[in-house]
Amino acid sequence: MRGVSVLTISLSLAASVAFSGCSTQGVATSVPPRIFREVHGLRVRSYTLAAVTRDLSTYRAAEIHYLDNLMLDQIPDRCVERLNSGFVERIRALGRFEQVRVIGDQPILTAGPGLNEKSDASATLVVEGYIDDYTPGIPKLRLIEKGDNHAILTVRILLKDKTTSEILGASNITVENSRVSSNVDRMVDKEVAEMANYVRRSATRP
């Protein structure tokens, strides 16, 4: 009986250790994705609405239109302004275009050497778009739902030929913020970066 008892205890300890090891491994493998979602909680989804099939590197100038806000008062004015001003700054910083014209709520703003109303329109790429979706999410629900109550910002961006108004490319870009402590400004800045990258990739010679 004593031998059986010792054997039983040994088997129990072994099973306990094995179970503990599996449990620890489960935590080790499940924690990193959770941390990644909360610390690096910005996710980007983009869908091509119209593929770029032409070489757009020949466009020397860009005409940037402020985004048409389809969400009206559902998105704060400061977010709309941050989107527009940030996007213009990004495009200028690319150094891709010799001339940049900005058309917004105010009279036409210009930048770039030698820009004037007689600039060659055939060499101008028009960039315009729409704010299609916005929700700040609810941080408290995001905590309860483990990050599933996302803050969302979606912009549809179009590239057009200045002379013909032909659509040369279009994309739908969505940024989701799944952080428990949502940072809307960071989400807006990420959207701006993705928009600028889309223009850069599209307008650069393959």
Image (cartoon, grey):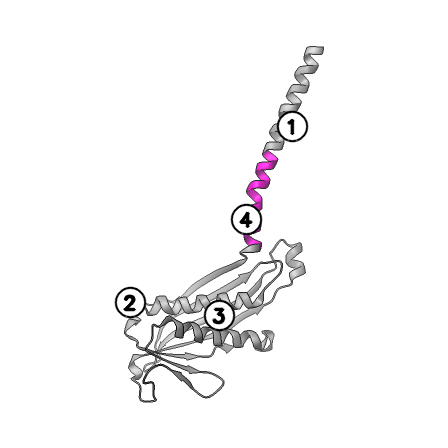
The residue nearer to you, when weighing 100 against 135, is 100
- Tell me which residue sits at (29%, 84%) in the image: 120
Question: Which residue is most to the right?
Answer: 1
* Few, some or many residues within 10 Å of mark 4 (<14, 14–19, 20+): few
Q: CA distance from mark 3 to mark 1?
A: 53 Å
Q: Is residue 172 visible?
A: no
Name the residue carrying label 4: 33
Q: Secondary structure at mark 3?
A: strand
Q: Which residues are magenta?
A: 22-38
> Which numbered disc, 1 or 2, marks the residue that appears first in the sequence?
1
Depicted 128 relative to depicted 108: above or below: above
Q: Is residue 36 magenta?
A: yes
Q: CA distance from mark 1 to mark 2?
A: 62 Å
Where is mark 1, residue-wise?
16
Residue 177 percent across, percent down from the top left: 56, 61
Check if mark 3's residue and mark 2's residue have beta carbons within 8 Å. Answer: no
Q: Marks 2 and 4, how far apart in space? A: 37 Å
The amino acid beneath tag 4 is Pro
Residue placed at 40% from the left, 67% from the top? Answer: 198
Magenta stretch: dominant secondary structure: helix
Residue neighbourhood size for the residue with mark 2, other residues' Cα within 10 Å, grouped as few (<14), some (14–19), many (≥20):
few
Q: Which mark is residue 84?
A: none
On the image, numbered disc 3 is attached to which residue?
155
Of the image marks 3 and 1, the number of the one nearer the N terminus: 1
